Amino acid sequence: MKKFFAKASRWLHIYVSMFSFVVVLFFSVTGVTLNHAEYFQSSVKTTEEKGSIDSTWVNTSDTLKIQKLQIVEFFRSKYGVKGAVADFRIEESEISVSFKGPGYEADVFIERETGAYELTQTNAGVIGFFNDLHKGRDTGRTWFWVIDVAAILMVVISLTGLILLLYIKKKRWPGILIGIVGLAVLYFLYHFWGQ
């Protein structure tokens, strides 16, 4: 049983590590870029547009007759607006639409009487895109599960690595000691210098 457990741990450690290598690398690199976000602010670009849409889409007393789909598709086709519609608000004199995606957001304000609009798009660039993927911000349900699976894979890698260490007699106690020292260093760094 002991041999089987060691062999299974080795197999899991090797193949789960290789399967999730890119995931671990991705979250490691984006952890650094998130921690130093101020260095990547220059890649953020904001553009503003003005114009008008067909006023019959928005100038109606019945809010159910406001042409939501036409409005959204107009901005997607004319300005390449992307991301999911995060908010569509209908006020008495104005409509506001927000689009959000990783590293991207767009806000549209439309006057209901005239159809005049203002569009602001903010693109955080490649680093902003990857940082939002790391955080799971505005990424959708599928990516939510990708993050959970990635976390589980990292737990499996860590635990199987620890189990394998316990099977190597010469390195068991030095390895455990280094693990304890690492934990203590993290604790002291946070406790004494982290605030």
Image: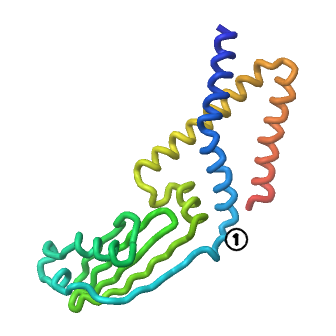
| Residue 5 against residue 38 in the figure, above or below | above
> From this viewpoint, which residue is outermost toward the bottom?
114
Q: Amino acid at mark 1?
A: Tyr
| Residue 4 against residue 146 in the figure, above or below | above
| Residue 35 against residue 65 in the figure, above or below | above
Q: Nearer the viewer, residue 144 or 117?
A: 117
Residue at position x 45%, y 77% in the image: 121
> Could you say where residue 57 lies in the image, as x and y percent from the top left?
18, 80
> Could you say where residue 131 lies in the image, as x and y percent from the top left?
58, 60
Residue at position x 25%, y 81% in the image: 91
Say what secondary structure mark 1 lies in: helix
Q: Nearer the viewer, residue 34 or 15?
A: 15
> From this viewpoint, which residue is outermost toward the front?
77
Q: Nearer the viewer, residue 43 or 87?
A: 43
Which quadrant: the N terminus? Answer: top right
Count the labels in the image.
1
> Could you say where residue 51 lies in the image, as x and y percent from the top left?
33, 89
Query: In which quadrant of the rendered view does residue 151 lie?
Result: top right
23 left or right, relative to 112: right
Q: Residue under circle 1? A: 39
Query: In which quadrant of the rendered view does residue 177 lie?
Result: top right
Query: In which quadrant of the rendered view does residue 113 lie?
Result: bottom left
Rate crowding at label 1 as few (under 14), some (14 to 19) or many (20 or more) other CA atoms within 10 Å. Answer: few
Residue at position x 43%, y 81% in the image: 120
